[in-house]
Structures are given as C-alpha cells and as structure tokens.
C-alpha cells in the first residue's frame, strides 16, 4: 500500500502543529479514498492498522465452532489477510485451562490474529483479555451475536442498548491492555442511531470497528440483505478503520462493497465457509478444498464436530442431490478423519469425470438450477429471501389446516394426501425410530461393541447382571459370598479371600517373639516418660 502526504506549502507546521492533512492510499480495487490524520503524530491507531494488521482488505470473520486454527490456515492459503478466533466466553476462558488452550491454539504463520471475547462484565473481560494478549494482535469485543444463547447470557448484540456498560468495558480494556481493542457490531434500523453508537465506541477507546449491516432481528430464514448504507454512514462519521460485513459471496462483491461504503476492508463469514477460495476469485472442486482441509486438521487437530460441519458446507450443493443421499448419511455417521477422506474420495470419483469434461453433466433434479457454476464446485449459498420464507410458511399452515379438516370429516385417504389415521406414527413409534437410528449410528463406529446383559447364575434368584470376567458367572455380591464360604478367589471381581487368608496365616507363623533386651529397653523408656509427667 502506498502512502504520501498532500503538499501544503502555505502552511507552517510549527505554527499549526495539529493541522489535519489528507493521506491518500490505493485500494485493492484501484479506487482511491481520502481520509485524515494529524500531521506529525503517528498515533497508535494508525500503527495498529498499517503495521500490526498490515492494512488488511480481505478478512475472515470470527465464527463459533468454525474459525479454528486449521480453517484459518486454509483461508490464509487462499487469500485471507486477517483472521479472528471463534468467539470465546470470557468467564469460561478465565477459569478453564483446557478451554483457554484450545481457544488460543495458533502457529507463527497464523498472524495477524485477533481474539474475540463475549461477556457483560468489564472485570471478567479484562481478566480474559490479559491472559490472551501475549498470543494475539488485538482483542475484539463481540457486540453482534444475535442468537438466542446470546440473549440468555446477555452478551453480543443484546448489549447494544446498554451504552454505559459498553463504555465501561471498552474503556477498561483500552486502559489496561497493551494491545488495541476492537468491536464487532450490528446496526440499528435508524442510521443516525447507528452512527451515534459507533461514535460512542470510538470515544470509549475502540481502535477498529467491524459493522455487520444487519439488525439483531435479521437472522436465520429472516436474514435478508445487509444495508451498506449504514456501513457507509458509520465510515464517514468515525476516524478509525472500519470493516464491512454482509452480502459478500464473491471477490467482485468485495470490490463493490469497498467502492460503495468507502470502508477499509471487507469481512466474510458464510461466503468463506462455502468457498474457502472466495478471496482468490476461484471456484475449485469441493473435494480439493475438503482434502486440503483434512490435511491441515491432521496437523492441527480440532473437534470432529467442527470438521463435519465444514464438510457439510463445502459439499452442500452436492449433498442436496438425491443420488448422493448415501454420501450424506455416511458423512453424518462417520467419526474419523480417514472416514471423512473416504467421503471426499467418493464424491471425487462420482463428479471428477464431469469436471474434467470426459462425461456430460445433465441436471435432472433441480428445476431452479439456472446458475453457471455446477454443483460440484465451491460456490456461495443462495439463501431464500424473508418474503419467500414467509410465503412458504403460510402455504404450509394452510395445507396443515386443510389436512386437519379432512381428518375431522373422515376424508383422509380419499381427498387428502395425508396418510390414514391408522398409519400415522405415534409418539412411541417415533421414539423407537430415534433410538434405532442412534443405535445404528454407534454400531457403525470403529471397534464398537454392544454389551449383552446376562443375569447372575446364582441358585437363589438374583436380578443383578453377571460379571463378564467372573469365574463363577455371578454378580459381585454373590461372588463375594461364595468365595467367603468356599475359601476361593475371583480375579475378575478382584475378590482375593483365599490369598489373603493364606498370607495372614503365613505371617502369624513367621512372627518372632520379642527379645529380653527389647523388653528392658521398652520399660526403661516408659519409666522416663512417667518421670517427666510427674
């Protein structure tokens, strides 16, 4: 990135030490932007952005159970310039060493790196940040999580209305930490309120803002589009770097977002999960990204649930095809890295001929398949709009009303598509299906052994299960009684009555009588003690 100072020969720097001069810098899309800083004062905020973070434009978002070390390294290989850890809970981080070790897992090439915390208490946030600051370049405060767990825990986006508390948290961290403090926020519906919110965080000591252009109500099926107008207004109102978040599905969206909002960089979350090469403007075969990621997981292990979640997103468009239902089930049930590799290789065998052009792909499954990109490459997920989702909900509700009416009128099976009453699965049947599915899943695990319970074979009826290693095929209680009566041992239960009796007998036989000298010495010591007492 190139920097130069605009020439102002008429001004005397000694007379006007605080004069503001424009600095111009080139953007990744070759657009030019003008912002201001104090001449002659190289502030910590400028140094943080340009030297520590190296002026990143392409940023991977903090994602719970998703932005772990292996995924960050994969993203950096394919163009990411800055990464965040997953959101870490400040209280758990301070008290749990294992949680802290897993959350801070990193390597030298995993820099620059920002650690993100959530919480609602300044002291606990500071305690966690002090533990993390030697291992990262900045501490980020999560003020954007809209999920129900954040509402119950009172953190994330549900703190955005408590400005005094946020001021205290940000100012406390800014005062006592040796590294900068950043914030990731969501917008209000009102642009002016969003701008005041950003100004408040800046004045409290925030060094960089990430603005997600959605409100906390925009989540799940009601996500909708992010407002770049809100992000633009924030950028125009603050003097610190601003990252834009939302509506990023390809590299062209990055260029367009930076041009529209004038922001300093762009953050991607969902777009990065479905295509780790999004910042390279490539759409590689899904199996290539999956196998590369699995190699990194073997080198930098993480929970298998994280791995499975990543593979489901990388293979999302393939697994939606009916012919790949078996692969989807296998991916859901398997639980080793080698099993996941086999899933990736199976997909490669099925779709590589189409990718290489040796076979012609004929789509006969999806009526709405109008994209240029085929389903076997990494590409963005097209989320239905909130209007489409609400329309679908209304249709389902109307259909359910008609079915209930048909059941009430006794017309089920004749005019309704719903199954007759006698074929409807009861709650008990549903529970049995779930249990069978769970047993099937665990039975397929490597070295899975299902124990068969055998009842104790004592002459007196005993309901307890038999010990698998018991020589007498009894439960532990019955086995102890038998060994006591018959002077026997049971190594399986660890009952050694016969052995202990023999040892006691041998010990009593080998015990020597006390010598006269010893008796005289003991009596002498006793007399001395009595004299002292008297």
Image (cartoon, rainbow, N blue to C red):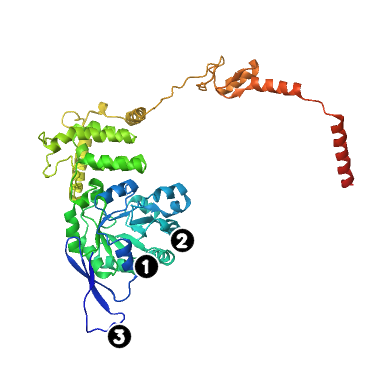
Q: Can residue 315 be seen in this view?
A: no
Asked whether 481 or 334 is in front, the reply is: 334
Q: Count residues near mark 2 (Cα–Cα under 10 Å), then give few for <14, some for 14-19, many for 20+.
A: some
| Sequence-earlier tag: 3 or 2 | 3
Q: Do the residues labelled 3 and 2 touch (CB within 8 Å)?
A: no
Q: Who's the residue at 65% across and 19% down the image?
A: 498
Residue topped by disc 2:
123
| Element at label 1 | loop
Q: Count residues near mark 3 (Cα–Cα under 10 Å), then give few for <14, some for 14-19, many for 20+.
A: few
| Sequence-earlier tag: 2 or 1 | 2
Tell me the CA gap for discs 1 and 3: 29 Å
Q: Nearer the viewer, mark 3 or mark 2?
A: 3
| Sequence-earlier tag: 1 or 3 | 3
Where is residue 265? Give x, y as percent.
24, 60
Q: Nearer the viewer, mark 2 or mark 1?
A: 1
Compared across the picture, whether 488 is left or right of 172 comes to right
Where is residue 33? Give x, y as percent.
20, 68
Task: Find residue 205 and name its label.
Answer: 1
Where is residue 468? Give x, y as percent.
50, 21
Residue topped by disc 3:
15
Q: Are marks 1 and 3 in contact (CB under 8 Å)?
A: no
Q: Are marks 2 and 1 in contact (CB under 8 Å)?
A: no
Q: Residue furthest top?
A: 459
Asked whether 189 or 241 is in front, the reply is: 241
Q: Which of marks 1 and 3 is in front?
A: 3
Q: In which image quadrant can residue 529 be found?
A: top right
Q: Count residues near mark 1 (Cα–Cα under 10 Å), then give few for <14, some for 14-19, many for 20+.
A: many
């Amino acid at each position: 990135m190139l920097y130069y100072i605009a020439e102002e020969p008429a001004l005397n720097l000694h007379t006007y030490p605080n004069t503001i001069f424009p600095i111009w810098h080139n953007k990744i899309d070759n657009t030019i932007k003008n912002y201001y800083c104090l001449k002659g004062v190289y502030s910590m905020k400028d140094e943080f952005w340009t030297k520590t973070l190296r002026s990143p434009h392409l940023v991977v978002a903090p994602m719970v159970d998703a932005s772990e070390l292996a995924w960050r390294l994969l993203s950096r290989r394919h163009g990411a310039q800055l990464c965040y850890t997953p959101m870490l809970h400040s209280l758990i981080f301070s008290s749990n060493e294992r949680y802290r070790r897993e959350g801070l897992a990193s390597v030298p090439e995993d820099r620059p790196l920002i650690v993100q915390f959530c919480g609602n208490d300044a002291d606990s946030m500071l305690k966690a940040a002090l533990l993390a600051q030697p291992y990262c370049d900045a501490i980020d405060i999560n003020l954007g999580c809209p999920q129900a767990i954040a509402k119950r825990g009172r953190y994330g986006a549900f703190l955005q209305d408590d400005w005094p508390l946020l001021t205290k948290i940000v100012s406390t961290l800014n005062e006592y930490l040796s590294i900068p403090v950043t914030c990731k926020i969501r917008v209000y519906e009102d642009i002016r309120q969003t701008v005041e919110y950003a100004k408040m965080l800046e004045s409290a000591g925030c060094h960089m803002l990430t603005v997600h252009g959605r409100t906390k109500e925009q989540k799940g099926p009601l996500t909708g589009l992010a407002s770049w107008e809100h992000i633009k207004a924030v950028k125009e109102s603050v003097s610190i770097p601003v990252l834009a978040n939302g509506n990023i599905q390809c590299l062209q969206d990055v260029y367009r977002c930076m041009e529209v909002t004038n922001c300093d960089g762009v953050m991607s979350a969902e777009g990065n999960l479905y295509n780790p090469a999004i910042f390279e403007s490539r759409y590689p075969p899904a199996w290539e990204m999956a196998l590369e990621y699995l190699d990194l997981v073997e080198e930098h292990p993480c929970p298998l649930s994280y791995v499975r979640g990543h593979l489901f997103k990388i293979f999302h468009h393939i697994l939606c095809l009916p012919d790949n239902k078996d692969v989807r089930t296998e991916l859901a049930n398997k639980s080793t890295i080698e099993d996941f590799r086999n899933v990736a290789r199976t997909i490669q065998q099925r779709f590589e001929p189409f990718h290489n052009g040796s076979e012609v792909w004929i789509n006969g499954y999806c009526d709405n398949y109008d994209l240029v990109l085929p389903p076997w490459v990494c590409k963005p997920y097209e989320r239905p709009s909130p209007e489409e989702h609400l329309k679908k909900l209304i249709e389902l509700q109307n259909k359910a009303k008609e079915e209930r009416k048909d059941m009430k009128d006794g017309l089920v099976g004749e005019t309704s598509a719903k199954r007759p009453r006698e074929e409807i699965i009861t709650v008990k049947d549903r529970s049995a299906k779930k249990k069978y599915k769970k047993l099937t899943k665990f039975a397929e695990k490597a070295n899975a052994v299902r124990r068969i319970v055998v009842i104790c074979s004592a002459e007196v009826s005993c309901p307890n299960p038999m010990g698998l290693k018991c020589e007498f095929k009894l439960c532990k209680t019955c086995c102890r009684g038998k060994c006591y009566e018959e002077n026997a041992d049971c190594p399986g239960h660890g009952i050694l009555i016969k052995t202990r009796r023999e040892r006691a007998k041998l010990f009593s036989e080998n015990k020597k009588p006390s010598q006269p000298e010893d008796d005289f010495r003991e009596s002498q010591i006793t007399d001395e003690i009595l004299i002292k007492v008297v």
